[in-house]
Amino acid sequence: MSDAREARRLIYLSGFEYPSTHGHPLHALSMARAFSSVLGDNFLFVIGGGVRHPALAGVQHASPFGGAFALLRTLHLRALGSALWLLWFLLRNPSWREDLIVFTNEPKMARMLALLSFVFPLRYVLEVHGPASSLALSRAHRLVFVTTGLLEENAAYAKKGSVIGNAVDADQFSEPRDEALRAKLGIDLSETVIGYVGRFRPMDSDKGVDFMLEALPSLPEDVSILLVGGTEEELDRLRVRSEELAVADRTHLVAHIPFDERFAYFTAADILAYVPPKEDRFLARETSPMKLYEYMAARRPIIASDFPAFREALPGGAAYLIRPGSVDEYCSAVESIHAHSEEAAARVENAYEVACENSWIRRAEHILELL
């Protein structure tokens, strides 16, 4: 690392609270760990109030408002409060103003930073995961788009924009197959298990869990599904439906697990699936799914819905892509994985190489190189 990079300071401004089961805060946690690893004491992660989660250990972080943050959130003043705190912090800590970049992936935070930049010498980077105001985009020093589709939608700002998808730490998926966990879950080693790990319906977005269950009767009897990450209400509903479909003995359900304890569940499966049945704007253009990078790192054949954003994360035949909602194509993909094991193995290795090339630290370094 160059001396200039070592001298750079970066503040990640967010209002995220931990612990969390939501995608954006968990993405931020991974990025904060990576920035912290690269920059050390020259990095500060600003979070919302609430519990100081053990996952933040080793990451220099600040929770400016403590319990009062809940009131700011209720009053919709979270972004304003965080921006004013940042100004207060920089006035009290002049050394942090030298070669400082503020990073955020929250559009409302970026809008406050844009306004602040009119009266205070401030450079910020906005990571774009969806719609953002023209003010936030135009005043940003650099823009990071998580998909090509988002860059194309914001072509007016393309000169200061780069596309950087998500990432994964592949070395965390070290076990080739977690047979002990399969035994604990009551999964016979002879079963072919298709797994899904993640929230089932965040913000009412259909992640394909119901599709996987409804398709199960169309698959051979030695195929089962492992669905990990649901709420108790969601699990109860799926249990009832699995009994109606007469596949309860082939349906393995696990509630939400802590973020840093999820790795074994990927490797407990033989195939991993992310098959939302309907395309929406988020799935088509606004997501670079962490889940797919984790699937690639787990070294399992992947079945995924054929969305533009999914194709971008899964280059070069890394997965079996199916028409969204097609039970026939889903079942054909499972059959193809069984019938053409050499082809499936080649796809797995190709995907694993992609995962290894896209670590969180490499992503953080890539962003710093843009500055």
Image (cartoon, rainbow, N blue to C red):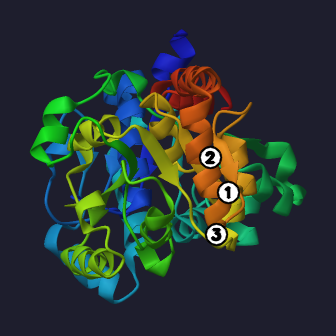
Q: Which residue reaches farthest top?
A: 2
- Determine whether 24 is above or below 189 in the image: below
Compared across the picture, whether 104 is left or right of 50 comes to right
What is the three-letter code of the residue carrying label 3? Gly
**Dot 1: what SS?**
helix
What is the three-letter code of the residue carrying label 2? Ala
Q: Label 1, on which residue? A: 329
Residue 143 seen in render: no
The residues tagged by marks 1 and 2 sit, at their Cα atoms, a distance apart of 6 Å
Q: Label 2, on which residue? A: 333
What is the three-letter code of the residue carrying label 1? Glu
Quadrant containing the C terminus in the rendered view: top right
**Dot 2: what SS?**
helix
Q: Label 3, on which residue? A: 325
Image spot of residue 48 (x, y percent): 28, 64
Q: Are marks 3 and 1 in contact (CB under 8 Å)?
A: no
Image spot of residue 220 (x, y percent): 45, 52
The residues tagged by marks 3 and 1 sit, at their Cα atoms, a distance apart of 9 Å
- Determine whether 20 is above or below 317 in the image: below
Q: Are marks 1 and 2 in contact (CB under 8 Å)?
A: yes
**Mark 3 vs mark 1: in front:** 1
Q: Which residue reaches farthest front?
A: 221
**Mark 2 vs mark 3: in front:** 2
Marker disc for residue 78 = none
Give the crowd class for mark 3: few <14, some 14-19, many >=20 residues within 10 Å: some
> Which sits earlier in the primary sequence, circle 2 or circle 3?
3
Q: Nearer the viewer, residue 117 or 82?
A: 82
Q: Nearer the viewer, residue 258 or 89?
A: 258
The residues tagged by marks 2 and 3 sit, at their Cα atoms, a distance apart of 13 Å
- Residue at 85 percent across and 49 percent down: it is 158
- Residue at 47 percent across and 18 percent down: it is 6
**Dot 3: what SS?**
loop
